[in-house]
Image (tube, rainbow, N blue to C red):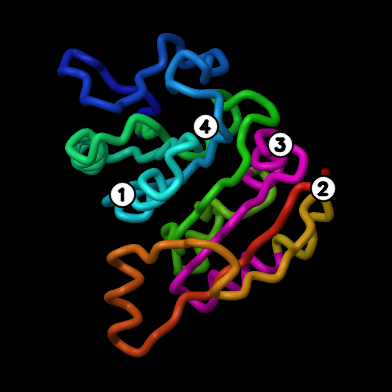
Amino acid sequence: MELFQSFTRAQEPNELIPADYFAELPLADHFPNDGPLEVDLGCGDGSFLLAMAEQYPERNFLGVERLLGRVRKVCRKGDRMGLKNLRVLRLESLYTLQWLLPPESVSRLHLLCPDPWPKAKHHRRRLFQKPFLESLVRVLEPGGEFLFKTDHDEYFEWSQEQLDDFPALKQLEWPEDAFFYPKTDFQLQWEGQGKTLDGLRSQKPA
């Protein structure tokens, strides 16, 4: 799978296209203010990302998504909503953390319902493991938070074990009313069937 893509197509409104995919992003060049940055990895249809950007206009939001159709949809909807604090990057999640985001540049990072790769032979493809956590700690600012949700019970247990073995992140309580946290369309569908999502919240020590 290619990490990068040709940009002969027109750039979407709110789309972030790096000038150099082998250098850290100059975030100040892409956002109109210097507010805290929140990142939504695998932002999908953008329902969570768009709601967050609308709720917190003083903060900046970056969605990362590798599928072009989804990127276009989120960018265009954000433009119609007049969101100036929103950008969408078409790229792989782990590469973005390892190479593009500057150290200690992210205040909160969200990972909602990533592919659980349920077959044992595919577990190595799961995002939530040590290389991801190491990259996460690199980009989180001191006191920054990582928030994770999944609808897959076994993947949740796997992720909990990975986090238990990673002392660089401190696990936090996450009561449902802790702060504004919109539900994705997928989560609403899942809960409509009487099911729930499991979540983990952790913090890089200040």
Real-space Cα distance between discs 4 and 1? 20 Å
Q: Amino acid at mark 2?
A: Pro
Real-space Cα distance between discs 4 and 2? 24 Å
* Residue at 27% over, 40% down: 67
Give whichever of discs 3 and 2 has the lower sequence position: 3
* Residue at 72% over, 61% down: 163
Q: Nearer the viewer, mark 4 or mark 2?
A: 2
Q: Amino acid at mark 3?
A: Glu
The magenta stretch spans which residues? 132-161
Give whichever of discs 2 and 1 has the lower sequence position: 1
Q: Residues within 10 Å of mark 4 (few under 14, many from 20)?
A: some
Give whichever of discs 4 and 2 has the lower sequence position: 4
Q: Nearer the viewer, mark 4 or mark 1?
A: 1
Left or right: where 54 falls relative to 80: right
Real-space Cα distance between discs 3 and 2? 9 Å
33 relative to 171, above or below: above
Real-space Cα distance between discs 4 and 3? 18 Å
List the residue tagged with mark 2: 205
> What is the number of the mark on residue 141?
3
> What is the number of the mark on residue 46?
1
List the residue tagged with mark 4: 95
Q: Is residue 144 magenta?
A: yes
Which quarter of the picture shows residue 139? Answer: top right
